[in-house]
Image (cartoon, helix red, strand yellow):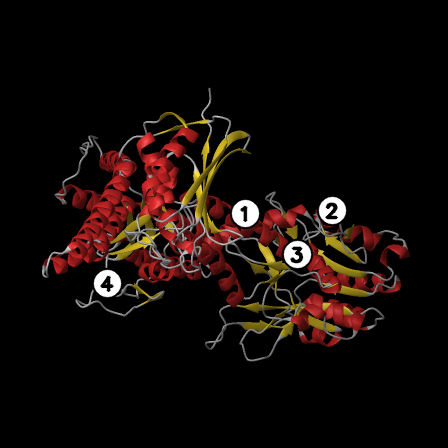
Amino acid sequence: MKLRLRLGIEWLVIGLVASLLILFSNRWEGTRAFDHLLYDQLSGLSRPDADRNILLVNIDDHSLGQLGKWPWPRRIHGQMIEKLQTLQPKSITLDIILSEDGDPADDTKLARAMAIGPAPVMIPLHFVAPGSAGRNYNIVPPAPIFAKAAASIGHVNVNINGDGVVRRAELCFDPESNGNRWPHLMEQIYRSGKGHPSPAYRKVDCAEPMLVPYAPRGSHNEISYADLLVGEVPKALIAGRDVIIGATAAGLGDRYSVPFGDGGTLAGSEVMANILRGLRQDAFIAAVPRSLSDMLSLMPLWLLMVGFLRWSPRTALTASLFLIGAILIGTAATFKWQYWFAPSGALLGILIVYPLWGWRRLQAMSDFMASELLRLERGGETVPVPVRKANATDLVGRQSAALASAIDHMKDLRRFVSDTLSDLPDPMLVTDGTGIILLDNDRARGRLPAPLIGHSIHELMARVADADHRIAVDLFLRSDTVLVGDKVSNEIKFNRQNSDGKRPHSIRFDTVDGDTYVIRRSMLKNSTGALQGHIYYFADITLLAAAEAERERILQLLSHDMRAPQAAIISSLGGPIDQEARQRIERNARRTIQLAQDFVDIARMAESKFDGGDILLADLIHEVADSFWPLAKERNLTIIVNDNSDAGFVTGEADSLSRAVANLIDNAIKFSPDHGHIKIDIDRIEGSGIPWLSVSITDQGEGIGPDILPNLFGRFVTGGKQHGRIKGAGLGLTYVAAVIKRHGGSISGENGVDGGACFKLSLAEATE
């Protein structure tokens, strides 16, 4: 199985298993201990102030010592209530079970005290579990005489958590779940003062326990039962307050563990005082609904699971710690807003899934490395560098050492490939599937315009290829286009397939710099055979292209100019050999010889090294001009040489330079009319800060035709009306241009103002 698929399956399984564990933990008492511990610590950070309108009258040890052992006669409670009524309290709560009948006189006295007012008297009822006749509870109300006298009756059940701590209060109790609800006794006190149920009672299902925020222990107003009964008490202590009478003496059993973290207990009457304060201030802490709690618990888990797909192990660990902190901070924040989110499920999910996923990922990676290293070892590929063997004692150590050895081997191969590419004689590029250049070599960086790495090969070739080949190269680079034609009349012929149905692997093109390349392309595939990119090799065939062009020119020479005079000679030999035939044969033979000599001289100059000496240019011009005296005299032409060079010397090859000047004078004679003159001016000029010698040769012919002038010094260019005995072969001016270029000079041709052609060549004057 592939590593990615295996990790994906295990990732999903781990996420689902962890989710089920979170949902289970949110319903399991085993995780409540941590939630309770955290709740107790948070509640202890900021406790509310006690309600100063509540007075606790405690049946404490002092009262037992003054009034006798418990239970006291009910007339004593009647006396207490009568005394309290005279002090005008807001309400009186007698937290004593009065479910059984006692002494009739005492009961009557207590009932009369409860009924006379003006402060309402509240008494509790209690429940016995399990109930009789299959009921969950038996309701045990106060005795009828007290039930009739009391202003209200309410339950005083406490909600004790599994650790024995009272953290919650039920604002109502439905013993049979039939809608017959008994409000809490403190809810009855709230209603007696406000005339309507409390906001907390109406906000949520009253049967849902509410977390009670406890004020500091002993912070409520308290007074001993005996002191109040037998002593003089200021009316201000009682008037307008809710009085709660309850047992606090040791052994009476009405004390409960509360979330104070110090292990102490709190009397039931003080617990009820905190409940009443919560009702009045609407300060209960509501537990987050279970469905929302499940969602909030699962959210950090799946955030982490999604992160596992993208994060590194270090980032995953940091994120896990961050999420744990975020869960705890979020719990504290919701507690501040009077909501309680139990974080144990969310924390448990993080604590389970991180090591579990780390283990499975490590195991999957270990198995994958083992299989890949084994496959690499058994691959049987011939490599140019040796593979170092890994030696270790344990499995992880062996795999780590083997992986390190494989990495070193890959580095060696990479260096081998890099060195091999660097030594290639031509540019080479490697691209990805989109044409972005990933790799190059030294020759590519030296021959192709930067930048290369990270840029598109299409953009690169748009800058490299000349205008005539740019479209062809671009289409060649695109994988869905096949080149089957060539450039014809500035148009490129393309088709979707070659004759064999395959895309070509190479294309020839010229660059903007005048070089000629052939691009060869091969596909770059991975171990599975999927295409990853292409390798482009640029073969420089500039010299080969020049040789091909030279061959083409030779073929033109052989097929055109040299074949024509040879055919004329053969034709002349077919008839009588008279004087005129001999002249034709001689003329065509000389033409062939001249053409061959010019071509050979041009080719020799391209291959031979320049070997010049000091030449007095004026003497060379006079000597060449004198050699044409017989030919000029035959046509009554005058050659005039004007020397203004002040005996200037040039560095040159006398033979080639003489012949170049001779070609120009010969052309002037050929194209000059009879009885005309040819003017040769030799001058000294300044150019680029150095002295130059200029030679101008001007005739009186018809001039250079406009169709010839742009390519005047090209091969096989002839034109105009020739008056000489030998027709030009088209290589004379090409030879002249080659000689002048070899000497580092320049040559130009134009038509004179007064007619005729004017050729001007310039050569740098030789230094002393």
Question: Is tag 4's residue or tag 2's residue first in the polypeptide sequence?
Answer: 2
Residue for badge 2 = 62
Q: Are marks 3 and 2 in contact (CB under 8 Å)?
A: no
Measured in 3D between alpha carbons, the distance from the residue under mark 3 to the one under mark 1, in whole angstroms, is 37 Å
Q: Is residue 299 above or below residue 404?
A: below
Q: Which mark is residue 503?
A: 4
Q: Is residue 288 above or below residue 510?
A: below
Residue sitting at 62 percent across and 60 percent down?
A: 339
Q: Are marks 3 and 1 in contact (CB under 8 Å)?
A: no
- Kind of element beneath mark 3: helix
Residue sitting at 68 percent across and 73 percent down?
A: 202
Q: Is residue 452 left or right of residue 493?
A: right
Amino acid type at mark 2: His
Q: Quadrant of residue 175?
A: bottom right
Measured in 3D between alpha carbons, the distance from the residue under mark 3 to the one under mark 4, in whole angstroms, is 94 Å
Q: Is residue 51 left or right of residue 269?
A: right
Question: Is tag 2's residue or tag 1's residue first in the polypeptide sequence?
Answer: 2
Q: Are marks 3 and 4 in contact (CB under 8 Å)?
A: no
Amino acid type at mark 1: Gly
Q: Is residue 159 above or below residue 686?
A: below
Question: Is tag 3's residue or tag 2's residue first in the polypeptide sequence?
Answer: 2
Question: Is tag 3's residue or tag 4's residue first in the polypeptide sequence?
Answer: 3
Between 477 and 339, the residue placed more toward the observer is: 477
Between 733 and 528, the residue placed more toward the observer is: 733
Q: Are marks 2 and 1 in contact (CB under 8 Å)?
A: no
Residue sitting at 64 percent across and 68 percent down?
A: 171
Residue for badge 1 = 325
Question: Is tag 4's residue or tag 1's residue first in the polypeptide sequence?
Answer: 1
Between 677 and 530, the residue placed more toward the observer is: 677
Mark nearest the camera among 2 and 1 is: 1
Q: Are marks 4 and 2 in contact (CB under 8 Å)?
A: no
Rate crowding at label 2 as few (under 14), some (14 to 19) or many (20 or more) other CA atoms within 10 Å: some
